[in-house]
Image (cartoon, grey):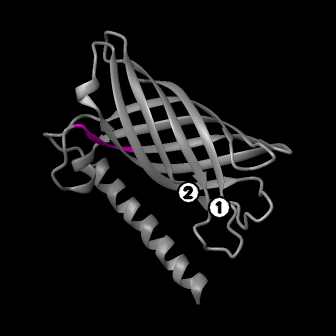
Amino acid sequence: MKRIYRLMITVLFISSISQGMIYAIEKEPGYLPERYGMGITAGNSYNLSGDIGFYTLTGFILYDYDRVWKHNAPEQLMFKVEGNLGIAHYKRTCATLSANIFALYYLDSFEGKTFKPYVEGGIGIIYTDFQVPGQGMRVNFNPQLGIGAEIKTGSEKAFYMALRLHHISNGGLDDENRGINSVMGMFGFYF
């Protein structure tokens, strides 16, 4: 019964995310235009004796937050949808795949001519083609928290750099729930 209850909560969570995505696709005047970006992400776990290295290609879309969630939000608040495809090295090279959503908030009071910092936090689903002892599942939740900055180049194009805390856990959906905590560095560009 406990597993069925947790599975129902997971399905409701995923369906609420998809409902927000439908709103985001609609073109409406009065909102900031979407921004697209891609980059590379690399990091390492810090809570396991056998370190796990992560290396992914990252792609994302940045939306005006109130366009997706249909309520007034500060101008600095954005909604980010991100996908990652890559590898992890844990005893052998394994595949990883994740889909995440974030609230991203620009720190305008610290903005400079070429530097626009932000904080972000979000959650997603991640598949890892490996399991550490006690992990329980290959499909897990993936909460993340980060700080980063856009580096402006004079045109509308910009680069970004970020540092994130990255967690992998099944949220108690399985009796075995050994989490993996990592620090990730990111670098990429908007187009």
Can you tell which mark lies on residue 125? 2
Residue at 28% over, 12% down: 113
Marks 1 and 2: in contact by CB < 8 Å? yes
Which of the 4 image quadrants contains residue 54? top right
Residue at 60% over, 39% down: 183
Magenta-colored stretch includes residue 133: no
Residue 71 located left or right of residue 157: left
Q: What kind of element bears circle 2?
A: strand
Q: Which residues are magenta?
A: 76-80
Q: Nearer the viewer, residue 151 or 39?
A: 151
Q: What kind of element bears circle 1?
A: strand
Mark 2–mark 1 Cα distance, whole angstroms, equals: 7 Å
> How many numbered discs sit on the rendered protein?
2
Principal secondary structure, stretch drawn in magenta = strand
Q: Which residue is mark 1?
A: 139
Under mark 2, the amino acid is Ile
Q: x, y percentage for residue 120?
A: 40, 42
Residue 122 in the image: above or below residue 107 = below
Give the position of the C terminus as an image quadrant. top left
